[in-house]
Amino acid sequence: MVMNISRKIEKVVVLGGGSAGLIAALTVKKMLPELKVEVVHSVELGVIGVGEGTTAAFPRHFFEYLKMDPMGFYLGAEPVWKMGIHFKWGPQTQGFYYSFQHEYKSRWPEMSRNTGFYCTEQTPWLGIASACMAHNKVFPRKPDGSPHFHKGHAFHIENIKLIGWLTGECRRAGVEFTEGKVSRVERGAEGVEFLELEDGRQVAGDLFVDASGFRSELLGRTMGEEYISFEKSLFCDHAVIAGWPRTTEPVQPYTVAETMDAGWCWRIDHEHWINRGYVYSSRFISDEDALAEFRRKNPKLANEPRVVRFKSGRYKRQWVGNVVGIGNAVGFVEPLEATALQVICVESSTLADTLKDSLCEPTPSLIDLYNRYNSRQWDDIRDFLSIHYAFNRRLDTPFWRACQEETDIAGAAEIVRFYQENGPSLVADAVLFDPTNSFGLEGYLAMLVGQGVPHGKPWSPPPAEAKVWRDRLAAYGQHGARGYSAEECLSLIRAGKIKFS
Ligand SMILES: Cc1cc2nc3c(=O)[nH]c(=O)nc-3n(C[C@H](O)[C@H](O)[C@H](O)COP(=O)(O)OP(=O)(O)OC[C@H]3O[C@@H](n4cnc5c(N)ncnc54)[C@H](O)[C@@H]3O)c2cc1C
């Protein structure tokens, strides 16, 4: 039986120097500078080296919560903007855009319903953000000609550059680093007493953050916390990853998620590199066949593809005794909505707030709430991803038939039932969605409307509304086409012509 923490926390040890460990260390140190924070990591074991798409929670965490300088991030991590996801999913059309703006939920003054009701398979975009995406533009142009640099965006960041920037920021903030492989963990009444490295050095602390990736050295292996698998909802468990150098192709400011025979393929654009990854289910395709399909559909691949294995699920509790898991050490869902860095940011800020508010003596009730809140986050993501699989009818393969027939849509069932009866009605918003659900009704509408899921209240707009719809989409298209490209915005930033408020 593990006791609760009885002593005041003065030193936090973070096991892991991947994005999870570094974000956790930076967040705790910046929010509680009085704490000693030490990162223990192994160069030999390395980091997972993937995780390049983010959500809008990422800039919120760094620039609003931690109040870090955006310019330092742009120059240090060299990101490009991600305005959403282009799903080549659902009916056999051009696919659909899911932007970070509220486009499916918005209700134009001239219309009797929200825009979700007017979308068809042919709708090319449904707001300025998606019109910009469709034209490879990042930010729209203001009336004075300057870019409207709004906050409804995320980033694509090369993992190695993100790690480099985070390491530098950690050092600047006063985080200490110890390199070495942990070979033994000393247990104590509260959980962990100290970590022992292969060369015999011992690293003690009051609170241990397990950011050791899929190894889950402390939460899983040492504390033996129960693991909850998401395999009934999410069947994919492998990815093969490679890319090619950008030459003349424009930077696409969105992630592409494209249906494949036994899964899906991402395209993530960086300034100088285009990253592709085929996420698939080993139940339905071998590594060799997945690689062959990946190569066939991506003839430009220029480096040797590498296979990464993963499982989707989470540990029952994230905080046990004096051990708090963050990142892959505590849970993982496959990257279809690129949510891992978002969850890491939320876990890290919740940890810092918990320490701050409890004067570094976290109470059992705070720890319990921490666990409930973070568990709900993981389950919400599983539920949302499950509908991507259950309703995608783009390809008729054994994998996709199994997805349609077998996917457990778990906590999404009530929302889907409501949609099937009532269509994209906003009435669902207040009752069916917890405020902490990061996708909310907008996300569900994007995926259900976008995939053409049939519902009981299709709306045939009267001629006057149909005309407003056509005219507005045409105007958005013109506006989108006039927007600023990623290349133009990068030049403006580097020339110091964008002022961050
Ligand atoms: C195919 C794929 C695609 C993904 N795409 C995205 C995406 O687009 N967006 C997104 O947000 N996320 C994505 N992710 C998830 C993302 O990569 C990770 O969640 C994120 O990088 C955090 O990883 P981590 O820090 O938890 O683990 P890791 O990067 O594996 O780091 C673990 C750290 O622990 C250290 N360590 C482990 N054991 C020991 C030991 N015994 N002694 C000393 N040190 C030790 C390692 O050296 C390393 O520093 C993707 C994941 C996969 C598998």
Image: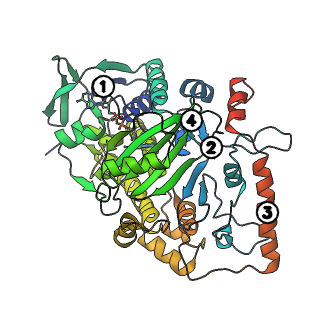
Disc 1 Cβ-to-ligand 1 distance below 8 Å: yes
| Label 3 neighbour load within 10 Å: few <14, some 14-19, many 20+ | some
Q: Spatial distance from mark 2 to mark 3, Cα to Cα?
A: 24 Å
Disc 2/disc 1 C-alpha distance (Å): 35 Å
In the image, residue 455 lies at what x, y percent?
55, 79
Q: Which of marks 1 and 3 is nearer the N terminus?
A: 1
Label drawn at residue 377 = none
Percent x, y of residue 444: 52, 64
Viewer-nearest of discs 2 and 3 = 2
Residue 182, given in percent of the width and then of the height, sits at: 21, 26
| Residue 252, numbered label | 2
Judging from the image, what secondary structure is the residue with disc 2 in? loop
Question: Which residue is identified by label 1?
Answer: 41
- Number of the front mark, 3 or 4: 4
Q: In the picture, residue 186 is in which quadrant? A: top left
Assign a secondary structure to mark 3.
helix
* Inter-mark Cα distance, 3 to 4: 32 Å
| 3 and 4 marks in contact (CB < 8 Å) | no
Q: In which quarter of the image is residue 144?
A: top right
